[in-house]
Amino acid sequence: MTGLSVRRAGDADRPLLERLWLLFRHDLSEFDGDLPSPDVTFRAERLAAAFEDPDWAAYVFAGPQDRPVGFALVRGLNGPVRVLNSFFVVRSTRRAGVGLQAVRAVVSAHPGPWEVAFQDVNAGAGRFWRRVATDIAGDDWRQERRAVPNRPDLPPDVWISFRSASPDQAQTEL
C-alpha cells in the first residue's frame, strides 16, 4: 500500500486503538474461542499497559487520507528484548504488504533483539511471522515453542526471535 504511515500513538489515539482492539480480539476469537463480555468488549490489559506503562508503546498504522489500518503494541522497551505483543492489520489491507511495511517501521524504531508469539492453529500468522523474520534477519532467526503462562489448557505458543538493525546500520549493510 502506498501512503502507509506508522507512528507512535499518543493519548489522543486511545479511543481509536480501543476500537481497533475490538477488531483484533474479534479476529483472534476464531482461534482462542474467547467471547466478548456482556458489553461487547474484550479484555484489554495489554492495550491499557501500552498507554500506562513506560516499558510499553503503541503504534498506529494509517493508510491514504489518514484512515486507520492497524496497530502494534510493543513491550520490553527498557529490557534486553522487545516483544511485539499485539499486531493487527484490518482485513481489507492484508496481503498488500501493509503488515510487513508496518513491522519494519516498528522494529527499526527499537533496534536489537525482538520476539513475537503466535499459536500454530493460526496458520496465516505463522506464515506471516516467518516471512517477517526472514525479511528482517535473513536466515538469522529462530523458532521455539513455549508453554502459555498460567494456561495449561492451551497448546504452547510458537515464539520467533530475530534481531533488527538500526535504520543507519540497515542502510550501510545494503
Image (tube, helix red, strand yellow):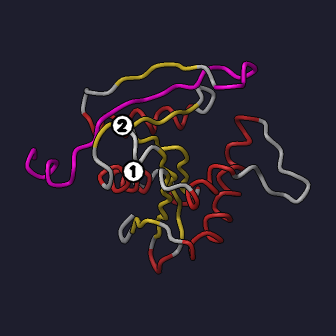
Q: Please, what is the three-letter code of the amino acid marked with disc 1?
A: Val
The disc labelled 2 sits on which kind of residue? Pro
Q: Position of residue 170 (x, y in %)?
A: 16, 48
Front residue of this view, candidates 9 and 120:
9
Residue bearing mark 2: 80
**Which span of residues is magenta-colored?**
149-174
Magenta span includes 166: yes
- In this view of the protein, which residue sits in the foreground, 154 or 70? 154
Verify whether residue 54 appears in magenta.
no
Label 1, on which residue? 103
Where 93 sits versus 82, above or below? Answer: below
Tell me the residue at 45%/70% (across/down). Answer: 63
Q: Quick one: label 1 or label 2, which is nearer the N terminus?
A: 2
139 horizontally vs 24: left or right: left
Instruction: Confirm or deny contact between disc 1 and disc 2 (CB under 8 A).
Output: no
In this rendering, is residue 133 above or below 152? below
Dot 2 falls on a residue whose secondary structure is loop
Residue 129 percent location from the top left of the image: 44, 37
- Foreground residue, 82 or 19? 82
- Residue drawn at (21%, 50%), measured in percent from left and top? 166
Give the CA separation, mark 1 to mark 2. Answer: 19 Å
User: Which numbered dot is residue 150?
Assistant: none
Disc 2 crowd rating (10 Å Cα; few below 14, some 14-19, many 20+) is few
From the viewer's side, name the closer residue of 158 and 90.
158
* Quarter of the picture holding the N terminus: bottom left
Question: For mark 1, does the 10 Å Cα neighbourhood hold few (<14), some (14 to 19), or many (20 or more) residues?
Answer: many
Secondary structure at numbered mark 1: helix
Indicate the position of residue 55 as horizontal and vertical percent values.
47, 50
